[in-house]
Amino acid sequence: MMVKADFNGERELLAWMRVLQFVELSAIHLDLSNRRARLPAELLALKGSGRSELTTWKIFERRSSVVQAADRLVYRLEGLRRTYSFRLNSFGSMLLVEEKPALIRELTGLNEEVEQFKAAYAIAIVKAYEETLEKMLAQVLQLAQVRQVEGEELEAYARRRLQLALGKPERFLASMRVKVVYKNMTVEMLTDGDFRRELQSFPKVIRALAAAGLEVSR
């Protein structure tokens, strides 16, 4: 059930929101070392009984230059997360509003680096997808017990299904970015004892609240 804020509650909330805000930082499609492709179930079903097969493939080799370059971007984001945000176990990550402009500048610069990465490694990423598809296709052709599926030659059918399962590398590249979402606090949080207790572990936050005439303890 939603709690309706009275005037004093709303006024206190606005005061807190001038100091604190929730933030969620994420690297979209930059964790290349864990990027895997899974063999579709309909292709697995074509294999002979008792014949072993791989079901997933790594698209990118862990030691490749493209993975190492992407990792550096992820590490940069982790550094920004440690610098500008602090995590409350029960509520998520927050930041001081006064530090938000600096974070925005850093994220703008980081996203520019992501665009540079995409331009530099686009060919390598597309090639990795194509090579993975060919490896998966070779296994399907080796293990399958049929030469046609639904009136279609096995190779053409399998290639089409694998392309659907893998997706287009160009679309994967286009969506690659660093994402930030900001969320406001609620009146319910201010009445939550756990929220206030967890804040007491962060002296910098306590000082910022005190400067705004706010107290963590009640």
Image (cartoon, grey):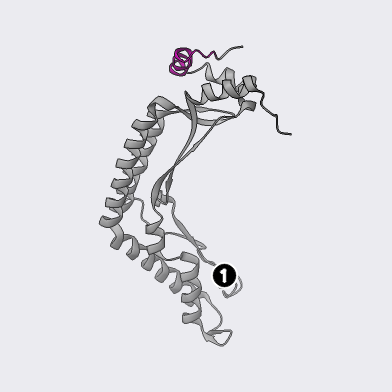
At label 1, counting other C-alpha atoms closer than 10 Å, the crowd grade (few under 14, some 14-19, many 20 or more) is some
Q: Quadrant of the C terminus?
A: top right
The answer to which quarter of the image holds residue 80 is top left
Using residue 7 as the reference point, say whether residue 138 is left or right of it.
left
Please state the extent of the stretch shown in magenta in the rendering.
203-215
Q: Write the residue at 49% across / 76% down.
A: 158
* Closest to the observer, 151 or 78: 78
The answer to which quarter of the image holds residue 118 is bottom left
Q: Write the residue at 38% across / 27% down.
A: 99
Query: Majority secondary structure of the magenta segment?
Result: helix
Mark 1 sits on what residue? 44
Q: Is residue 92 visible?
A: yes
Residue 171 higher or lower than 97, as above or below: below
Residue type, numbered disc 1: Leu
Is label 1 in a helix, a strand or a loop? helix
* Closest to the observer, 162 or 10: 10
- Residue 162 spot, x, y in % from top left: 48, 70
Residue sitting at the far right: 1
Using residue 119 as the reference point, say whether residue 165 is left or right of it.
right
Residue 178 higher or lower than 129, as above or below: above
- Residue 34 spot, x, y in % from top left: 44, 51
- Residue 123 spot, x, y in % from top left: 29, 63
